[in-house]
Image (cartoon, rainbow, N blue to C red):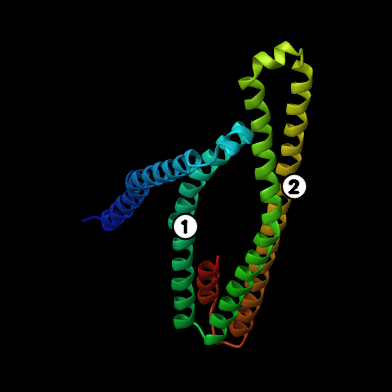
Amino acid sequence: MPRSLRHLHLIAIYTVMKLLAEVVNYLREIPFSYVSANAEKHIAKTVHSHMQNQSLSFHLNRETGKVLRIVNRGSQSFASVMRYTMYTLMPTFLEIAFTITIIGYLFTQKYLYINLGTIIVYIVVTIICTEWRAKYFKRLALSDSTYVQKATDSLLNFETVKYFNAENHERNRFFTSLQTYKEANITVAYTLVTLNTLQAVCISFGLTVTLMMAYGDIINGKLNVSDFVTFNLYIV
């Protein structure tokens, strides 16, 4: 076999494995779709039954649009939480565990402790910032429900609006609620930027410290350049 063709089977194996990884990534949506659909169905059914069991005074005084928006958002959010947990959080923690273990095995223990400390600081910062952002998310959810409620009520009671010639009044109420929602949405975006910036600072600080330590070990002959590159790839 010519030398140029000797390792073609390795290239073929690589491309096939990459294809399989992509296919499996798509196929995972099939079982998850059943789980998320059943979860949304169960939550919607439970909430609907709960609403039906409420007193007459509750139904007379309720804001239909706001209630429907809350029910819809709640049932959809559960599927989003499941997807984020299964496809983001769990793989990330597994990857962190494997990476930290490999670093501790291939290199000295000080690198393991530095990176483990970085991950702990990262998690603490994330939890604190998430708790801080919670109030802004609540404000966003409330303003979202409010502007939907204004639109729904104005349409459900369209005859009354026409009877009192209150189109401009209803339009102004809706626009005011929509403006409040926009401001709350922008505030949440700002807080997300703050969170992501602090997370990036934590990771960058840990990466800088570990790479400087690795550079010192290279100078002292404890590591070589290939170790430095490998270590950097594991951290990234």
Instruction: Tell me residue 66's x, y (percent).
Output: 62, 36
Across and down, in percent, residue 177 comes to: 74, 33
- Of the pair 68 and 133, the residue shown nearer to us: 68
- Quarter-wise, where is residue 169 in the image? top right
Name the disc covering residue 85, or none.
Answer: 1
| Foreground residue among 145 and 158 | 158
What amino acid type should be assigned to the residue bearing mark 2? Thr
Tell me which label, 1 or 2, sits earlier in the chain: 1
Residue in view at x 61 percent, y 21 percent: 156
Q: Looking at this view, name the residue that lies furthest to the front.
A: 56
Look at the image and tell me in which quarter the N terminus lies: bottom left
Total numbered labels placed on residues in the image:
2
Q: Secondary structure at mark 2?
A: helix
Quadrant in which the C terminus is drawn: bottom right
Q: Kindly report the distance in space between the C-alpha atoms of the residues bearing marks 1 and 2.
A: 25 Å
Q: Which residue is at 40% across, 47% downward?
A: 39
Give the x, y percent position of residue 212.
65, 78
The residue depicted at 64 percent of the width and 73 percent of the height is 121
**Residue 187, labelled with which disc?**
2
- Residue 162 percent location from the top left of the image: 71, 12
